[in-house]
């Protein structure tokens, strides 16, 4: 059962992971994080395949992938 | 890498490049033998993010500083991390001669076609017609010359063992970049000569675009001029 | 008619250069002076001038050298680390007797330092900076108006003496905004330059060099340069003096610090302490004479700078009499407040003090 964990306060809301996820499981939150960014959040870990493309594109090492 | 927030703007692929270099260092388990030399620019805080010995070199001089380090510590893995002003403008002499001497170091060159840290001035790699704060009407070859293709130029030098250009604008390219960086470090471990990886990057802040737009611009405007590929491999 | 506008220091300086007839700018980006190349990249083409963002400061100063040799008014601008790179070029310019303007918008150092303001490049500017027996003409503005005026003056002095001139300001002056008057009438027409390399048509060919190998030649050349500097010291010293008539203590400060000192002097006046100010505007030639004369009547001097003690040495060299000399310096980007300065003034009166 794969899933990802996004470090909310490390994320700067660039949106690369949103674009990279082949199953469109990630979106940008409407609530600010402690840094003042709108971070990415995982909508639906149920359908995560653990492909890790989101983590590959993240410039802030904010995503941990569990396979 | 050190567990901390980086100063890079949201979506800046310096962050990605840092991570790829760190992954290569981890992959070869050389953290304790690696010494990094950073240039001046947005990359100047590299020593805060890598848990390896590192030094900040004067602007453009990183390859010369790295030469000094590698000659004293030939068994260590030495890399430089430089932007387009540092390497291709003020540092052209240093990179060419370090490459010519075939120093066994790895040069990580992040090319985003502008001077980021100082506010978006023209870089040697700025594209023709590109507007920057010092080319307000767009780069004109009659005044400012043409953008420089460093990876191709260095490939012509005998001392260079590996010269490649990669991108980081989507997951597929990031994975390719990771492999290139890994190969560059591998060849240094095997003492084969200078290894050079040019990474195309976006500078969203100074290009004045959103992160995903910047990535698209890399794909649609930079890559046609700065082609991806391997220009030399021993 | 002169117009009054609100302007930023760096831009005022660039405008002054254009008014002075400078049509050649070569430079490299470095904080805190990027406004200068950015502004000139747009303006120079408009006035038929040339702007080149050079590959480095080394290239920049050599482009200035070339343009100057060809008879033009040329300039570059930078900050500490870049000015260090230009030292060889400045030495060559002084040796070939070439004019040209170099602007140093000082930041903290040494090394990469930071982008906070500083006056730590005083020695570099006034002691030549590069190798050999020469000096730069050094001017220190203390207001946005002076950034404009002294840019023009610098070109005039540089051409008059055939020697590089440097404007030594700091990040505060570069970035601040004040109302200024763009006085278009101020500058002296650039003098004729028969020595310039313009092609030997209708005259014998000529050259510019700095190498003197024959026995005794270099000595003659050095003495000729010295003669120039002696005339400069006699004729073109510029300074401001305030309240020296009845002062009990005189403060010597330049640039941004002088502005802070002026406020301290006002506060001191309200407290009944009479403080005078000598503000050097040319740092080379240094206003040694006015300081030497002043301390004959006022036996207390306080030197205030944003460094750990540089101009204070020139003040010491200017004094013959026994005088209570105090120093207050804030290096590393620390900007003294008027209250800080006043505190140090008061210490000077304390018999247990310095």
Image: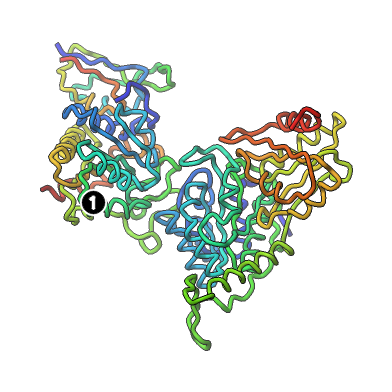
Q: Within the image, what quadrant is residue C21 found in? A: bottom right
Query: Residue at 32% of width from left, 35% of height from top?
Result: B14
- Mark 1, chain letter? B
Residue B217 visible somewhere in the drawing:
no
Residue to which mark 1 is pinned? B99
Q: In the rendered view of the protein, which quadrant contains the N terminus of chain C? A: bottom right
> What's the colour scheme?
rainbow
Image quadrant holding the C terminus of chain C, namely top right
Q: Nearer the viewer, residue B62 or C179?
A: B62
| Residue A46 against residue B68 in the figure, above or below | above
For label 1, the SS is helix
Q: Nearer the viewer, residue C133 or B7?
A: C133
Horizontal side of residue B138 vs C37, given as left or right = left
Is residue B153 depicted above or below B181 in this figure?
Answer: below
| Residue B231, percent from left and from top | 16, 50
Q: Does B17 sit left or right of A32 as displayed?
A: left
Q: Total number of numbered labels?
A: 1
- Residue at image position (59%, 59%) is C136
Q: Residue at x 32, y 23 (%)?
A: B2
User: Could you say where residue A28 lies in the image, as x and y percent from the top left?
Assistant: 33, 21
Residue C24 vs residue A58: left or right?
right
Give the percent coordinates (x, y) of residue B143.
40, 62
Whether residue B153 is situated above or below residue A66 in the rendered picture:
below
Front-most of B59 and B31?
B31
Residue C221 at x, y = what percent? 57, 72
Q: Which quadrant of the view contains residue C262?
A: top right
**Camera sees residue B56:** yes
Q: Residue furthest left?
A: B234
- Residue at 19% across / 37% down in the picture? B75
């Amino acid at each position: 059962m794969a899933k990802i964990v996004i470090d909310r306060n490390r994320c700067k809301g660039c949106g690369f992971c949103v674009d990279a996820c082949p199953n469109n499981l990630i979106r940008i939150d409407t609530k600010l994080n402690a840094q003042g960014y709108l971070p990415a959040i995982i909508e639906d870990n149920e359908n995560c395949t653990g492909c890790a493309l989101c983590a590959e594109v993240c410039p802030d090492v904010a995503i941990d992938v569990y396979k | 890498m050190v567990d901390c927030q980086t100063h890079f703007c949201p979506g800046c692929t310096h962050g990605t490049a840092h991570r790829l270099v760190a992954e290569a260092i981890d992959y070869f388990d050389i953290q304790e033998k690696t010494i990094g030399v950073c240039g001046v620019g947005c990359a100047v805080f590299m020593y805060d993010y890598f848990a390896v010995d590192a030094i900040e070199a004067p602007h453009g001089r990183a390859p010369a500083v790295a030469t000094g380090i590698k000659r004293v510590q030939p068994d260590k893995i030495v890399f430089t991390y430089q932007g387009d002003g540092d390497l291709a403008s003020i540092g052209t002499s240093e990179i060419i001669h370090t490459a010519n001497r075939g120093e066994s170091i790895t040069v990580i060159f992040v090319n985003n076609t502008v001077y980021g840290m100082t506010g978006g001035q023209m870089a040697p790699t700025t594209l023709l017609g590109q507007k920057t704060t010092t080319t307000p009407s767009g780069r004109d070859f009659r005044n400012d010359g043409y953008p420089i293709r460093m990876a191709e130029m260095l490939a012509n030098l005998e001392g260079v063992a590996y010269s490649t250009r990669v991108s980081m604008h989507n997951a597929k390219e990031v994975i390719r970049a990771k492999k290139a960086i890994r190969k560059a470090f591998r060849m240094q471990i095997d003492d084969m000569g200078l290894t050079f990886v040019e990474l195309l990057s976006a500078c969203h802040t100074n290009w004045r675009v959103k992160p995903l737009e910047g990535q698209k611009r890399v794909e649609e405007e930079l890559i046609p001029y700065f082609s991806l590929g391997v220009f030399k491999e021993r | 008619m002169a117009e009054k506008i609100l302007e930023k220091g760096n831009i005022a300086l660039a405008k002054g250069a254009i008014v002075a007839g400078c049509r050649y700018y070569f430079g490299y980006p470095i904080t805190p002076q990027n406004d200068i190349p950015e502004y000139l990249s747009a303006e120079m083409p408009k006035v038929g001038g040339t702007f080149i963002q050079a590959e480095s400061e080394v290239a920049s100063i050599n482009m200035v050298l070339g343009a100057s040799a060809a008879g033009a008014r040329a300039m570059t601008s930078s900050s500490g680390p870049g000015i260090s790179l230009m030292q060889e070029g400045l030495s060559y310019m002084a040796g070939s007797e070439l004019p040209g303007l170099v602007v140093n918008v000082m930041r903290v150092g040494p090394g990469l330092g930071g982008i906070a303001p500083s006056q730590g490049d005083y020695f570099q500017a006034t002691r030549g900076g590069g190798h050999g027996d020469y000096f730069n003409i050094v001017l220190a503005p203390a207001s946005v108006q002076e950034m404009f005026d002294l840019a023009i003056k610098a070109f005039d002095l540089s051409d008059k003496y055939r020697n590089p001139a440097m404007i030594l300001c700091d990040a505060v002056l570069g970035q601040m905004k004040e109302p200024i008057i763009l006085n278009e009438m101020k500058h002296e027409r650039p003098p004729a330059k028969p020595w310039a390399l313009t092609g030997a048509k209708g005259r014998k060919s000529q050259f510019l060099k700095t190498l003197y190998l024959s026995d005794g030649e270099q000595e003659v050349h050095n003495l000729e340069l010295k003669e120039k500097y002696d005339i400069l010291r006699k004729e073109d010293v510029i300074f401001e003096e305030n309240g020296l008539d009845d002062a009990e203590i005189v403060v010597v400060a330049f640039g941004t610090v002088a502005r802070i000192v002026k406020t301290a002097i006002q506060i001191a006046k309200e407290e009944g302490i009479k403080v005078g100010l000598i503000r050097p505007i040319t740092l080379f030639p240094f206003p040694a004479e006015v300081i030497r004369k002043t301390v004959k009547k006022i036996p207390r001097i306080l030197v205030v700078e944003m460094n750990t003690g540089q101009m204070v040495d020139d003040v010491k060299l200017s004094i013959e009499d026994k005088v209570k000399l105090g120093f207050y310096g804030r290096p590393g980007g620390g900007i003294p407040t008027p209250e800080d300065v006043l505190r140090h003034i008061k210490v000077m009166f304390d018999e247990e003090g310095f």
